Amino acid sequence: MEQLVIFGVLIVLGFTFGKANEKKHYKSIREREKSSRSIAVVNFKKPPFDDSKIEDQKLVIGATVISIDYFKLISAGLKSLFGGRLRSYESLVDRGRREAILRMKEEAKGFNMILNVRIETSSISKGPKNNSVGSLEVLAYGTAIKVNEV
């Protein structure tokens, strides 16, 4: 019985701290997104204006690795038995994507726009049964351009 109580306490602690960390990360993301709104991120292959206005350009990359907490891993495993949306994985992918884009924008400071943006994801660690996600790597990259304001 004592082991069951310890297991329950650990699950509650994992859920509580995992939720708190996720909220803290989302708050940080929202604040940083507000401050980086001046850099447009688009998937156009070419700029929507004459190339002669481009003053400078460079490749910018943003990468992050996000890990799923144990409670979400358990709840996703149970949900996958019955089917439906795996919201715990959706938030993992959303946080990773937004963080990678923010890091790419941070690398593009001083530029006006990032063109041809691409986002790639990959699972970089597996669970003990080798069929569940443990960590997710998200890579965002594009071409930052500085426009001559003529």
Image (tube, rainbow, N blue to C red):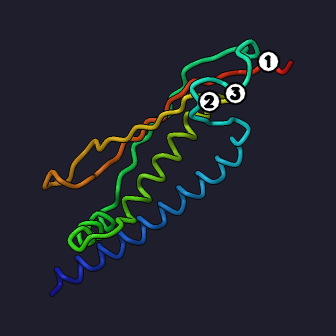
Question: Which quadrant would the N terminus be assigned to in this image?
Answer: bottom left
What amino acid type is highlighted by mark number 1?
Asn
- Mark 2 crowdedness (10 Å alpha carbons): few <14, some 14-19, many ≥20: many
Q: Earlier in the sequence, mark 1 or mark 3?
A: 3
Say which residue appears at 52% left-offset and 45% top-offset.
99
Label of residue 10 in the image: none
N-terminal-most mark, 2 or 3 = 3
- Percent x, y of residue 84: 32, 70
Using the image as rendered, state which of residue 73 and residue 143 is in the foreground: 143
Q: CA distance from mark 2 to mark 3?
A: 12 Å
Q: Is residue 106 left or right of residue 93?
A: right
Q: Are marks 2 and 3 in contact (CB under 8 Å)?
A: no
Quadrant position of residue 2 = bottom left
Q: Which mark's residue is nearer the viewer, 2 or 3?
A: 3
Q: Nearer the viewer, residue 143 or 36?
A: 143
Residue 115 position in % (x across, y down):
60, 28
Residue 89, percent from left and from top? 36, 59
Lateral position of residue 24 relative to residue 67, left or right: right
Please state which amino acid type lies under the numbered disc 3: Pro
Q: Name the side, left or right, on which 137 lies relative to 125.
A: right
Residue pointed to by mark 1: 148
Q: Which mark is residue 48?
A: 3
Q: What amino acid is labelled 2 in the image?
A: Ile
Residue in the image at 63% along x and 54% along y = 30
Dot 1 falls on a residue whose secondary structure is loop
Q: Which residue is mark 2?
A: 114
